[in-house]
């Protein structure tokens, strides 16, 4: 769905991401994983989207390797999918439908010897799962994220981003990364970055915000407004 669309502020305010990222030197990030419940969305008449995912890259690079769930409002109705994407080498691939309340675990891992990424997602509520192996050597491997996103691709918007669907609070648990060979929950890394989704450079309106990391390194993302 594309990398973080942001501007230069220490808080890493973003136009399309909310959540946390752990960063490292190029090539040091080799894994990320997380768990959440598929959020319910309240739909109006217009199209709006909310994606929840874990991924590698995208914070300061043009590529993202990501897997997660998507809630789409269209025609006043809500639709829910599991998906993966290797951006920008291909579009988002929807692989299954999911239901609000389903518990999801997902992970992206990189094998440097093979130059390949494995993207996996397991719906623990239904037992459904998928795993995809994709080769890609043109990536930075410099950040790992657990994110709620307002996806791009809206030709009617000047920003190119769809309005953020009104989602119920997303609680990430067990958000973890592997950086420089060390594996741990995301809050253990000194380079962890909090990302808030805002409407404009002055941060006049917050679209979605992340809570503080808890003692167990879990956190929640809360919706505030669509655009």
Image (cartoon, rainbow, N blue to C red):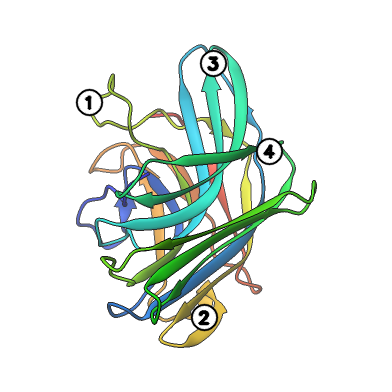
Q: Residue shown at 31%/60% (left/top)?
A: 59
- Label located before the other in sequence (4 or 3): 3
Gap between marks 2 and 3 measured at Cα: 40 Å
> Of circles 2 and 1, which is in front?
1
Which residue corresponds to mark 4? 98
The one of 213 and 77 positioned closer to us in this rendering: 77
Q: Which mark is drawn over residue 158?
A: 1
Gap between marks 4 and 3 measured at Cα: 21 Å
Tag 2 and tag 3, C-beta contact below 8 Å: no
Q: Residue shown at 40%/48% (left/top)?
A: 17
Relative vertical location of residue 226 with respect to residue 182 in this rendering, above or below: above
- Label located before the other in sequence (2 or 1): 1
Q: Position of residue 29 (x, y in %)?
A: 40, 76
Report the side of 74 relative to 36 (left or right): left
Which residue corresponds to mark 3? 44
Q: Position of residue 30 (x, y in %)?
A: 44, 76
């Amino acid at each position: 769905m594309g990398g973080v669309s942001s501007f230069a502020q220490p808080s890493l305010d973003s136009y399309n991401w909310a959540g946390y990222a752990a960063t490292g030197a190029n090539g040091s990030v080799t894994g990320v994983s997380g768990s959440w419940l598929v959020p319910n969305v309240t739909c109006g008449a217009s199209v709006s989207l909310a994606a929840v995912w874990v991924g590698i890259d995208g914070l300061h690079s043009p590529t993202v390797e990501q897997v997660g769930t998507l809630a789409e409002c269209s025609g006043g109705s809500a639709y829910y999918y599991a998906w993966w994407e290797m951006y920008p080498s291909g579009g988002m691939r929807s692989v299954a439908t999911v239901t609000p309340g389903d518990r999801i675990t997902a992970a992206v891992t990189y094998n440097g010897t093979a130059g390949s990424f494995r993207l996996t997602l397991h719906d623990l509520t239904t037992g459904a799962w998928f795993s995809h192996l994709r080769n890609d050597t043109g990536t930075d491997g410099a950040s790992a994220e657990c994110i709620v996103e307002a996806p791009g691709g809206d030709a009617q918007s000047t920003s190119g981003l769809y309005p953020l669907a009104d989602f119920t609070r997303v609680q990430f648990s067990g958000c973890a990364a592997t950086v420089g060979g060390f594996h741990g929950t995301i809050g253990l890394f000194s380079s962890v970055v909090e990302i808030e989704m805002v409407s404009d450079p002055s941060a006049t309106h917050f679209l979605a915000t992340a809570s503080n990391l808890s003692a167990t390194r879990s956190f929640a993302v809360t919706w505030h407004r669509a655009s």
